[in-house]
Image (cartoon, rainbow, N blue to C red):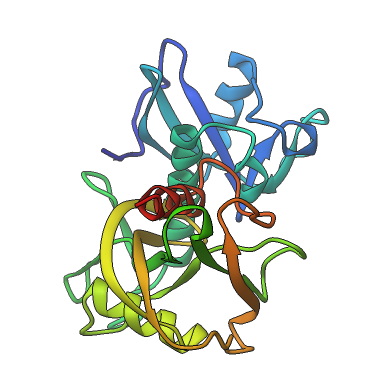
Amino acid sequence: MIIPRPKEFPDGNPIFMIISTNLVLQTPGGGALPTLSRAQIERLWGVATYHARIGEYAENPVFLLVVEKIDSFDEFEFKPLRSLLTRIDAELFALAGRACQVAYFIRTHNYCSHCGEALTEVTDELAVYCQRCDYRTYPRISPCIIVAVYRGEGPDAEILLARGERHPPGLFSVLAGFVESGESLEQTVAREVYEESKILVTGIEYVQSQSWPFPHSLMAGFVARYAGGELEVDGVELIEGGWFKFTDLPHTPPAGTIAAALIEHARQCAKG
């Protein structure tokens, strides 16, 4: 549960996610979250433009502090959220992602989309409110699918992997795409796979979901079996792709990502 603007500074051993624009305060090189003194945190608490309790980690409360960039912490730096992806565990990364999503919502919802009036924050839940037209706005969550497509069984089984325009050179992953209005998740899986690769799928199976805060997606993860078609990447969203044996995979997303979990799930499915 998210508690906007708690009134009192927390006791105990709270964890703070310190956000400025789209960046997270981290140790040099983006290694991990910094450990600040109580005096430093109290100062940031006092100057923060927004703060909220956003969850709990290892029985410790987790707080978001939104601040303007501060140059007095020379040993730390503001880095993109992605820098933390392989350096903290999945649970803590999810909370860092939540911090970024909440900060993004507050930063981008200043005026009513109906009448243009300035919005005010709601303190009993995460929302903003227009007093002129009585319209309440909540954070946007954009559903999308991500799917591991496999074919064959046993040692000859293969998985469909591709490299998108935004992927680093050499990194291959499973396919993904946004849900369109009026679609079921299963329909989105079939459509996105065909649009991007001309591959038909069957046996669509839900596996798990993961919040993907870039900036506000919820990824529903699936596996599916190959049902026909010749691979032809679209050249727009995907620039390279192929079928890879599970015993000889290229560079793929790291552990802790939903893509890595789906690749492993597909591997288990293909064992037969």
Q: Nearer the viewer, residue 186 or 266?
A: 266
Residue 110 picture location, percent across and down: 42, 67
Residue 111 position by quadrant: bottom left
* Residue depicted at 58% across the width and 59% down the height: 245
Compared to residue 110, the image places residue 15 above or below, namely above
Residue situated in front as seen by the camera: 229 or 152: 152
The quadrant the N terminus occupies is top left
The image quadrant that residue 204 belongs to is bottom left
Query: Against 89, is 206 above or below?
Result: below
Q: Say which residue appears at 44% left-offset and 83% top-offset.
A: 199
40 versus 130 height, above or below: above
How far from the left and from the top, in percent, is residue 268?
39, 47
Q: Is residue 199 left or right of residue 234?
A: left
Image location (x, y in percent) of residue 92: 48, 33
Residue 128 seen from this side: no
| Farthest front residue in view | 155
